């Protein structure tokens, strides 16, 4: 009976340790996701600004007759 309890205690301790490790990993992944989401939004804004500048430049180019 004592050996069974010791085995269960050990398994429970391992489970708690794994739970804590997964919580830490989850927190880290959430932070990484937030950072990548912000970076993606920033790059999207830069892309939109570049597109607008290119479109404005293209409008300034006179059309040639062929």
Image: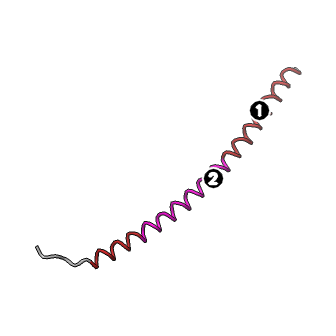
Q: Which residue is painted at 51% across and 60% down in the image?
A: 40
Give the residue at mark 2. 30
Q: Which residues are magenta?
A: 26-49
Q: Which residue is painted at 69% across and 42% down in the image?
A: 22
Q: CA distance from mark 2 to mark 1?
A: 24 Å
Going by the image, does 15 lie left or right of 26?
A: right
Q: State the quadrant of the C terminus.
A: bottom left
Q: Which residue is painted at 43% across and 66% down in the image?
A: 47
Going by the image, does 44 lie left or right of 15?
A: left
Q: Which residue is painted at 19% across and 77% down in the image?
A: 63
Q: Position of residue 32 (x, y in %)?
A: 61, 53
Give the residue at mark 1. 14
Q: Position of residue 43 (x, y in %)?
A: 48, 63
Residue 40 lies in the magenta stretch: yes
Image position of 59 with respect to 27: above or below: below
Give the main secondary structure, helix, strand or loop, of the magenta stretch. helix
Name the residue nearer the viewer: 50 or 40.
Answer: 50
């Amino acid at each position: 009976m004592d050996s069974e309890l010791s085995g269960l205690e050990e398994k429970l301790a391992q489970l708690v340790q794994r739970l804590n490790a997964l919580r830490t990993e989850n927190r880290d992944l959430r932070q990484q996701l937030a950072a990548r989401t912000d970076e993606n939004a920033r790059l999207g804004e830069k892309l939109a600004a570049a597109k607008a500048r290119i479109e404005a430049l293209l409008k300034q180019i006179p059309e040639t007759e062929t």
